[in-house]
Amino acid sequence: MQQTLIILKPSTVQRGLVGEVIDRFQKKGLIIAGIKMMQLGDEILREHYAHLVDKPFFPSLLKSMQATPVIVMCLRGVDVVEVVRAMIGATNSRKAAPGTIRGDYGMSGQENIVHASDSPENAEIEVRRFFAPGEIFDYSPVTLSATYAADELK
């Protein structure tokens, strides 16, 4: 099964939306393989957002991502990267479709509720960045057979 990284951003924590957002992922049938709260430091944020470090908005991004602790999760599922990207919607929450997490809960491009890996390759890198090997669990929930057809799990 594929895995992806999710970060419930400070805007989610501050607005009391953590439970609602996690609930949406679970109701979809995704498996939480790892979850923890952590305060992000400059080093991990500079690594995670290396492609944005030279942008003029980067200092405000750092400040935003350090406003409170965040919740990081490793989710698993068939085609989970694609599924989660569809669930969260466009990066700018004002442009995200209703029914998506950002579309339902966000109004900002930066304070956009959640980060999710954008490819299976980046997901593997990002999960390793935020989780030690012993923090990711491989188990099969009893609901798995009601979530997927048997041939989808091969």
Image (cartoon, helix red, strand yellow):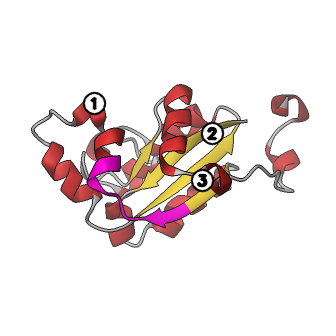
| Residue at image location 24% in from the left, 48% down from the top | 110
Spot occupied by residue 139 in the image (x, y as percentages of width and height): 80, 52
Around disc 3, counting alpha carbons within 10 Å, would you say few (fewer than 14), some (14 to 19), or many (20 or more)? some
Q: Which residues are magenta?
A: 36-44
Left or right, 127 with reference to 63: right
Q: Is residue 20 or residue 99 the one in the foreground?
A: 20
Callout 2: helix, strand or loop? Answer: strand
**Which label sits in the foreground, 1 or 3?**
1
Magenta stretch contains residue 25: no
Badge 2 or badge 1: first in the primary sequence: 2
Residue type at the position of mark 3: Phe
Which residue bears the numbered disc 1? Answer: 51
Tell me the quadrant of the picture where the C terminus can be found.
Answer: top right
Callout 3: helix, strand or loop? Answer: helix
Badge 3 or badge 2: first in the primary sequence: 2
Around disc 2, counting alpha carbons within 10 Å, would you say few (fewer than 14), some (14 to 19), or many (20 or more)? many
Asked if the residues shown at circle 3 and circle 2 are in contact, with their CB atoms under 8 angstroms apart, the answer is no
Query: Which of the labelled discs sits on residue 128, or is there none?
Result: none
Which residue bears the numbered disc 2? Answer: 3
Which residue bears the numbered disc 3? Answer: 25
Left or right, 81 with reference to 96: right
